[in-house]
Image (tube, grey):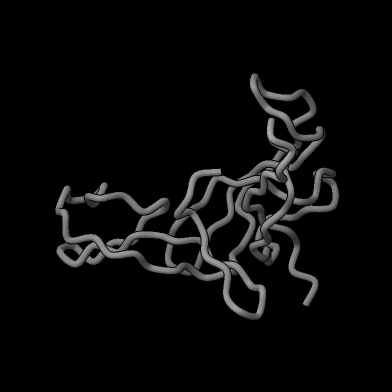
Amino acid sequence: MRDGLFTMATDGSARLLGGWCGTCGERHFPSTASCPYCSAEDVTEAPLSPTGTLWSWTAVTAPPPGYGGEVPFGFGVVELPERIRVITRITEADPARLRRGQVMRLEIVPLHRGEDDRPVVTYAFGPDER
């Protein structure tokens, strides 16, 4: 996974790293050097909320080209309180166990093992059981 997509706190919780534009005030994910809304380069890194609501979802039952993880897996869109919709892996692979508006929490999950046998991780959202 690309560096700079998330950060881990000392308590083990994760947050996605978005960008905040000092010119237009919009937030975006992932963070980029210039604002995707106004093209200003006044962008600073901004941790995003660790929870959001499920907006849409499906199950991926066939591996995409080059994908080394297990199938099936959930895939969907989670809307964060910052009004950012994140296209993301969903930890629940059974669509019948999900519902629109369900509270979802960010998790860092194993994806597969790399060519050097090191674990490769990714971010995903799962139903918030708290």
Residue 59, placed above or below residue 39: above
Give residue 58's position: percent from left, percent from top: 71, 38
Residue at 72% x, 53% y: name it.
109
Give residue 124's position: percent from left, percent from top: 66, 53
Question: Which residue in the rendered view is the most extreme toward the top?
Answer: 65
Q: Nearer the viewer, residue 128 or 41?
A: 41
Residue 81, placed above or below residue 87: below
The quarter holding residue 75 reads top right
Residue 6, placed above or below residue 67: below
Residue at 25% x, 50% y: name it.
33
Give residue 52's position: percent from left, percent from top: 59, 65
Give residue 76's position: percent from left, percent from top: 63, 44
| Left or right for 35, reference 113 | left
Residue at 69% x, 30% y: name it.
115
Question: Which residue in the rendered view is the most extreme toward the front?
Answer: 116
| Left or right for 33, reference 7 | left
The image quadrant where one finds the C terminus is bottom right
Residue at 74% x, 42% y: name it.
74
Residue 68, placed above or below residue 18: above
The image quadrant where one finds the N terminus is top right
Q: How many marks?
A: 0
| Left or right for 36, reference 79 | left
Q: Nearer the viewer, residue 46 or 118?
A: 118
